[in-house]
Amino acid sequence: MEIISEYHAEMAALFARVFLGLLFFFQGYDAVVKIGMRESVEAIRLPLQGKGIPDLMIVLGTWFNSYVELICGALLIFGLFQFASMYLLGITLLVASIGFGIHTALWDTKNVMPRLLLLIFLLAVPEHWHLFSIDTLLFR
């Protein structure tokens, strides 16, 4: 039992990382595979039309967010390139927050806030808490 109690912090980081990775992966999977990028772009474009945002920014932002969520979510699940993935996912949260903020001033943050809090937690914990990851096997 001693070995189990020795790794509480590392297990907390593992569960948070895998859970966050799953949230982002399935969000990206829905946008890229299930819905399709054409429909995803249209879903974002419609509420933002007439708000002064160039169409190219909407298209690029949707593609960027969707593919980063899919790829970096998968990388987070396995703990490969996890810090680079978390930085890119943080950017997607900022891009999405700007888009939602432009669309609706008082938008519901129920989908963004858990991801943001988990991301901040994972970036703030000591690096040695990220023990159970492919990064640890390959780069330490």
Image (tube, rainbow, N blue to C red):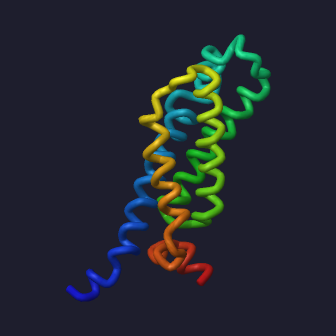
Please state the horizontal and vertical placement of residue 114, each as a whole percent of the image.
43, 46
Displayed quadrant of residue 69: top right
Q: Is residue 3 above or below residue 107?
A: below
* Spot occupied by residue 110 in the image (x, y as percentages of width and height): 42, 35
Residue at 61% x, 64% y is 83
Q: Residue furthest left?
A: 1
Closer to us: 15 or 26: 15
Name above or below for residue 74 compared with residue 105.
below
Relative to 54, 105 lies left or right: left
**Residue that extends furthest to the front in the rendered view of this protein:** 106
Image point (27%, 81%), residue name: 5
Quadrant of the image occupied by residue 67: top right
- Left or right: 2 with respect to 46? left
Give how far across and how far down residue 73 sits, in percent: 53, 52
Quarter of the figure that contains the C terminus: bottom right
Residue drawn 54% across the image and 78% down it:
136
State which quarter of the image contains the N terminus: bottom left
Q: How many marks?
A: 0
> In the image, residue 15 lies at what x, y percent?
38, 62
Q: Quadrant of residue 104?
A: top right
Rendered residue at 65%/37% (across/down): 95
* In front of the other: 4 or 68: 4
Please, which residue is most extreme toward the top here?
A: 50
